[in-house]
Image: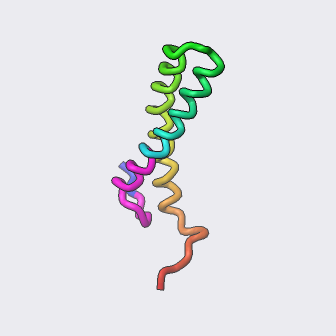
């Protein structure tokens, strides 16, 4: 397991990933439904992408939390 020493806790990163992905999945569902005209297909697409994109977002957040570039020092 890789440990990152960023400013955010793992729980915060997970919650942010889930809340952001929920919005993104609703968008994906609506676009898929618009293009296919079928709720079943739109639901399948949205259901699959929510799992993969939560994992990618979490990893992305943890990596950026460990990078000090662009942060202001707290005095």
Q: Position of residue 73 (x, y in %)?
A: 52, 79
Looking at the picture, tell me which residue is in the foreground, 54 or 26. 26
Q: Quadrant of residue 12?
A: bottom left
The answer to whether 47 is drawn above or below residue 38 in the figure is below
- Residue projecting furthest to the bottom: 75
Residue 7 part of the magenta-drawn span: yes
The answer to whether 69 is drawn above or below residue 44 in the figure is below
Using residue 17 as the reference point, say whether residue 33 is left or right of it. Answer: right
Q: Position of residue 57 (x, y in %)?
A: 50, 45
Q: Position of residue 24 (x, y in %)?
A: 53, 38
Colour scheme shown: rainbow
- Residue that appears at 43% across and 66% down: 7
| Residue stretch rendered in magenta on the structure | 4-17
Q: Position of residue 4 (x, y in %)?
A: 41, 59
- Residue that appears at 38% across and 49% down: 15
Residue 60 part of the magenta-drawn span: no
Number of on-image labels: 0
The answer to whether 51 is drawn above or below residue 74 in the figure is above
The answer to whether 7 is drawn above or below residue 54 in the figure is below
- Residue that appears at 47% across and 86% down: 75
- Residue projecting furthest to the right: 35
Looking at the picture, tell me which residue is in the foreground, 47 or 67. 47
Looking at the picture, tell me which residue is in the foreground, 3 or 7. 7
- Residue that appears at 59% across and 23% down: 32
């Amino acid at each position: 397991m890789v440990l990152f020493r960023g400013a955010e806790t793992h729980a915060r990163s997970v919650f942010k990933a889930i809340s952001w992905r929920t919005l993104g999945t609703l968008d994906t569902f609506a676009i898929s439904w618009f293009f296919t005209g079928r709720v079943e297909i739109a639901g399948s697409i949205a259901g699959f992408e929510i799992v993969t994109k939560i994992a990618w977002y979490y990893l992305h957040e943890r990596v950026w939390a460990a990078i000090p570039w662009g942060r202001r020092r707290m005095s």
